[in-house]
Image (tube, grey):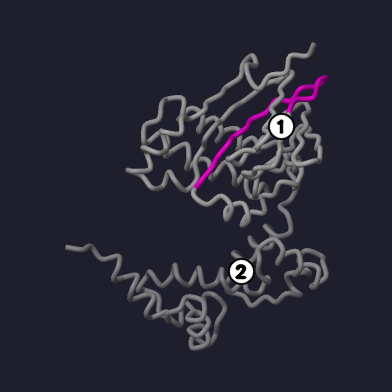
């Protein structure tokens, strides 16, 4: 007879935080109500791992499969999970069941977490019950952050330990939401189209470059490149380039040694008045006002 179990695996790590911990901590630190770890664990070769949640789970659950295989059922659909895949389930009242493959049980890092408004959090990041497993390159950074979270909580539930662990949680999640910004290329290949374009933009802020030129740099059609860029960044390449220019302008305006026209010229604007109009449109105030307010704020107060 197979002995199914929810934990108790050789070499496992597991911490379940008492609910009263956060109830008390929130009174002195509201930060701890925004997003917080409720359970955290590591199950190596978790033979016969089996967990049934008839009423779902009040927390979000992220499970990262390092090796071996597993499966889960949510609602009435079954999914299989393999090495270097993760599942991210939102807090739900749906029936949920998951466990390890009988022949090749999974090794998993996992975190349960909750927060003040999980419905909005999950909607904004498209965390849905039926998303299915997600492929990911070996996530070395996530494992390092997980270790930091676990070690902090292992040392007890002081305010500092809780704050460190839960601030690390944001970073941990980001490595799964935006892996291309955190993971090293295993084959040493060149950066992807979007990142290489942004690096090129940052190195050429003094130039005027249009969409056709950006596309040509990547040997793509203008329409296809623009579609890729907009999908990755949420805005057209031209708008992104302008924002980077204004970011540089803001940095230069901190230095009173630069005249406004010099700032304009350095980011590709021959007409300082046109530069001022673009700056005000994006920043809400003129370059002169921005400089005045920043310098005023930087002065020591008596």
Q: Which residue is mark 1?
A: 65
Q: Secondary structure at mark 1?
A: strand
| Whole-number angstrom distance, CA of label 1 to CA of label 2 | 42 Å
Q: Which residues are magenta?
A: 99-115
Q: Which residue is mark 2?
A: 204
Magenta stretch containing residue 113, yes or no?
Answer: yes
Q: Quadrant of residue 85?
A: top right
Dots 1, 2 in contact, CB < 8 A = no
Outermost residue to the front: 55
In this image, 4 relative to 245: left or right? right
Visible in this render: residue 250? yes
Q: Secondary structure at mark 2?
A: loop
Instruction: Return the x and y of residue 209 as percentages of the image width and height.
Output: 67, 75
Residue 239 in the image, given as x and y percentages of width and height: 63, 74
Quadrant containing the N terminus is top right
Instruction: Judge from the rendering whether residue 253 lies leftward or rightward of residue 302; answer left or right.
Output: right
**Foreground: 19 or 215?**
19
Against 125, is 227 above or below? below
Which circle, 1 or 2, is nearer the viewer? 1
Query: Residue 59 versus residue 295: which sits nearer the camera?
Result: 59
Dominant SS in magenta: strand
Residue 219 image position (x, y, % from top left): 82, 65
């Amino acid at each position: 007879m197979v002995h199914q179990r929810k934990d108790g695996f050789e070499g496992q790590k597991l911490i379940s935080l008492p609910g009263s911990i956060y109830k008390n901590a929130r009174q002195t630190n509201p930060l701890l109500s925004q997003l917080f770890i409720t359970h955290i664990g590591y199950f190596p070769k978790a033979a016969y791992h089996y967990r049934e949640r008839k009423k779902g789970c009040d927390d979000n659950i992220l499970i990262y499969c390092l090796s071996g295989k597993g499966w889960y059922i949510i609602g009435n659909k079954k999914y299989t999970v393999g090495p270097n895949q993760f599942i991210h389930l939102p807090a739900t009242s749906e029936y949920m069941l998951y466990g390890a493959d009988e022949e090749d049980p999974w090794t998993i890092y996992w975190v349960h977490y909750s927060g003040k408004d999980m419905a909005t959090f999950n909607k904004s990041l498209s965390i849905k019950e039926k998303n299915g497993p997600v492929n990911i390159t070996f996530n070395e950074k996530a494992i390092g952050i997980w270790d930091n979270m676990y070690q902090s909580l292992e040392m007890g539930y002081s305010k500092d330990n809780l704050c460190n662990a839960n601030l690390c949680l944001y970073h941990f999640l980001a490595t799964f939401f935006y892996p291309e910004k955190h993971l090293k290329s295993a084959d040493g290949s060149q950066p992807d189209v979007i990142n290489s374009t942004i690096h090129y933009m940052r190195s050429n802020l003094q130039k005027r470059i249009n969409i056709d030129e950006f596309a040509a740099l990547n040997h793509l059609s203008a329409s296809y490149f623009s579609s890729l860029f907009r999908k990755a960044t949420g805005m057209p390449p031209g708008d992104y380039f302008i924002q980077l220019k204004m970011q540089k302008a803001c940095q230069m305006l901190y230095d009173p040694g630069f005249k406004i026209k010099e700032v304009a010229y350095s980011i590709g604007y021959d007409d300082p008045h046109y530069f001022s109009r673009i700056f005000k449109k994006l920043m809400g105030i003129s370059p002169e006002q921005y400089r005045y307010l920043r310098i005023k704020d930087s002065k020591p107060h008596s």
